[in-house]
Image (cartoon, coloured by chain):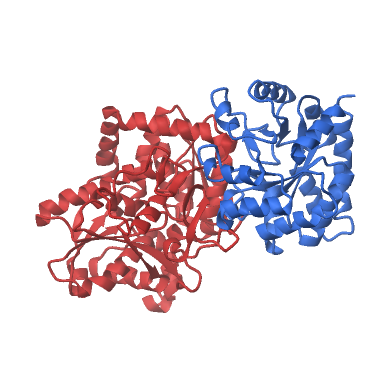
Chain colours: A red, B blue
Amino acid sequence: MQSLNTYRAGPDERGHFGIFGGRYVAETLMPLILEVEKAYGAAKADPAFTAEFRELLAQYVGRPNPLYFARRLTEAFGGAKVFLKREDLNHTGAHKINNCIGQILLARRMGKRRIIAETGAGQHGVATATVCALFGMRCVIYMGATDIERQMPNVYRMKLLGAEVKPVTSGAATLKDAMNDALRDWVSNVADTYYLIGTVAGPHPYPAMVRDFQSVIGEEVRAQILSQEGRLPDSLVACIGGGSNAMGLFHPFLDEKSVRIIGVEAAGHGLDKLHAASLTGGKPGVLHGNRTYLLQDGDGQIAEAHSISAGLDYPGIGPEHSWLHETGRVDYVSVTDDEAVAAFQQCTRLEGIIPALESSHAIAHASKIAPALPRDHLMVVNLSGRGDKDVSTIAKALGDEHLGGLV
Amino acid sequence: MSRIEKRFAKLKAENRAALVTFITAGDPDRATSQALLDGMPAAGADIIELGMPFTDPMADGPAIQLAAQRALAAGGSLRQTLEMVEAFRKTDTDTPIILMGYYNPVYAWGAETFAVDAAKAGIDGLIIVDLPPEEADELVPFLRQAGIDFIVLTTPTSDDARLPVVLANASGFVYYVSIAGITGTASAAQSAIDEAVARIRRHTGLPVCVGFGIKDPAQAAEVARVADGAVVGSAIVSVLANNIGKPNAVSAPLALVKDLAAGVRGARS
């Protein structure tokens, strides 16, 4: 384990976090990737860009959203004082919109008129279609045929917003395959198209850029907890698929040694069965533009992931998480489908808040560790999105007897 | 002199371009794929590209995606790919073989060990689609040490500023990807190919082969007039796909190779 003066300096000028990250893309895309990097560097240094980003977050997304003290969950756990960061209250219902606002401003700055994106659960697709509607841009969303079937309401939302939803039938027809097809589209339409990646993964500069746009989550939490409790939190908990909501919460706190930081991966049916826990069950490899931990076999073939949550159903993870895992700064744990479903119900019944199945993984882990912690321990759990989209999945998982035959 | 250099020297003496043929190793099964590989030189292939099957071929169109899926489903792997080349070398020690694919299987093997093992198997060059010059230094030094050429890809987006960066790592030959796109889809206009090949030649003395979108003998002949090689992949793979399980699974793709070879050989006469 390394001990560093700062965990916030990465990536280096070549886009590496230690051995992770980088730019592993086809040569056709390299000039464009370099252009995105240059344009983002210039945008970041431009106060007018930041001002417009902040203005849209405030007026359009509805930020800052609350850091809510979850009294009844806290009582039920019987230990740490639990706060929920309410990303579910954002416009479009999840944290994904923060990044989409930032990247659509960049795409406009670069003169691009056509936006492509991949989506798993459909949250990033909806957020992308939303900002494309707002900015009058063409929008094409790649979505695995399997995911289209299990996330139909989001597909319809995207179409209402004017996006073209392209079903992906290659491979297992889920998020990984949607990302392959988005990359194929990009290679074929380099001149006019911008790829709006939804998580802290892909070739440099995406992992750093998406992190920067999502860091508003952690920055708000810092100000809010200082104002509400007069001190920093003792722990942070967030779920991880690609890891953008987690990175957005974690990054502003990485150098605060007193803050324990925990990322929660999807253990699916269990770590010895089908799951999506890349750090726990994978090893370093190269896919979709970056080196990171991947679920793979001994031949370097990428494995299919499984999670009940479509948003976590991906065999990789953002490269900065891989680095934070290897440096030991962040603890990565995992939660099964069943545990996430139980946490979903508990949060819904006790707080009147229906959390996304993704976020339910974070709540489930909080429920495991909070009871043993002292009552003055301040724990922030990222409620990254709302769970309306998941009710049919939950109904299927529980069976309708559970609700007295109401579904 | 490497096998690749010897081959291009011989072709230069014959005043003709190379026919470079692509199949995916292990598609649709080891035995069929081996028979096809072994039959390539007699059918007229001058250089063979052998695809390393991968679950996520991001730069490939449907034909080669499906080829990789068939190969993997039948037990294909990077190890099997090397074994196929070893077997090929028992009867052919002259035809250059280039492995083409994606980085992760090579990385999983270990770059340094893989370079040694690939050279031992009789492999002459490597094309790694998702390893641009910005990342190539983690593999290229090991390939050089093992005497394997790193074949670089240049594309319509490689302008005069970018070309020197890409060509800095190049040896063997240069592969010009003639469209901004994926394999087996669109074809470039011949005038655009002529112009691109001329531009690349201003930056390098290496042979220039052109691929992506070449489907038939006439197109191959057009390319062979200006370039040092014409690469055909998806068209051959598609013929194979249409004949899987039939008695001509091997002979049908080889018949296309014969036609392509005739096109290439007649191009400059």
Spot occupied by residue A77 in the image (x, y as percentages of width and height): 22, 73
Is B42 placed above or below A145 here? above
Q: Is residue A21 left or right of residue A344?
A: right
Q: Residue at x 87, y 59 (%)?
A: B246
Q: Residue at x 58, y 59 (%)?
A: A172
Q: Nearer the viewer, residue A251 or B246?
A: A251
Spot occupied by residue A328 in the image (x, y as percentages of width and height): 32, 59
Q: Judge whether residue B77 can be spotted in this image.
A: no
Q: Is residue A226 left or right of residue A292?
A: left
Q: Nearer the viewer, residue B221 or A186?
A: B221
Name, please, the residue furthest toward the left. A230
Q: Judge whether residue B268 can be spotted in this image.
A: yes
Is A292 placed above or below A138 here? below
Q: Residue at x 40, y 59 (%)?
A: A389
Q: Is residue A157 left or right of residue A361?
A: right
Tell me which corner region of the image, top left, top right, bottom left or bottom right, holds residue A43.
top left
Q: What is the quadrant of the N terminus of chain A in the image?
A: bottom left
Q: Residue at x 29, y 71 (%)?
A: A346
Spot occupied by residue A93 in the image (x, y as percentages of width and height): 34, 52
Q: Exactly how many numbered labels are in the figure?
A: 0
Q: Nearer the viewer, residue A163 or A286?
A: A286
Tell me which corner region of the image, top left, top right, bottom left or bottom right, holds residue B204.
top right
Q: What is the quadrant of the C terminus of chain A in the image?
A: bottom left
Spot occupied by residue A29 in the image (x, y as percentages of width and height): 54, 36
